[in-house]
Amino acid sequence: MPLPSIAALDAMTDEALATALGPLFERAPGYLALLAERRPFGSWDGLYQAAEAVALTAPDPIQRELLDAHPRIGAPPGSVSALSYREQGYDREQAEAIEALGPLNDAYEVHFGFRYVVFVAGRPRSAIVPLLRDAIGADPAAERERGLRDVVAIARARAQALGIEEGTG
């Protein structure tokens, strides 16, 4: 599924933009509506800058929506988007790591009130277990900011995987 050019994104209706960029941001509607208001982007870099600014300054319910739109690390394969499935490496993970992530996700969500999102970047789930374990003890504001920044890093990587080159329009 190719992404439109930045010029096309800048000219789209808000609804069309949400459809086009939805796969990058797990279709979080409130967030995508706020992002649409930040146009024109002018470049992919401009889009990512706007995406991060919106993520970090959005009202609490929109931030939670954006974080919670992402599947849990270690979620059942049938419950995640095709891009998340590929990113989380369902075909190469250890059963022990998958089992450990469930209770850690539960503890994180109870503690913070939002889902743990991390830019996996090809790391196996076994490498995510200690990160999630450590995150549970993190400062809530810092952890929310880290997660929101990772959402944008995930979107950037997804766009690049779909053939977007940095600095092009």
Image (tube, rainbow, N blue to C red):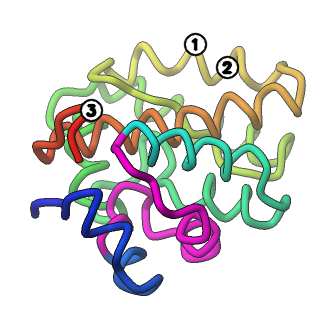
Mark 1 and mark 2 residues within 8 Å of each other at the beta carbon: yes
Residue 126 location, quadrant: top left
Per the rendering, the mark at residue 130 is: 1
User: What residue sits right under mark 2 in the picture?
Assistant: 133
The quarter of the picture where residue 25 lies is bottom left
Task: Return the residue nearer the eye: 161 or 86.
Answer: 161
Amino acid marked by disc 3: Gly
56 sits left or right of 52 in the view:
right
Q: Is residue 159 above or below residue 64?
A: above
Magenta residues (range): 20-44
- Depth order, front residue of 144/36: 36
Q: Which of 135 and 37 is in front in this view?
A: 37
Q: Point out which mark residue 66 bears.
A: none
Instruction: Count every numbered label the image shows and give the total.
Output: 3
Q: Nearer the viewer, mark 3 or mark 1?
A: 3
Which residue in the structure is indicated by mark 3?
167
Q: Left or right: 161 with respect to 56?
A: left
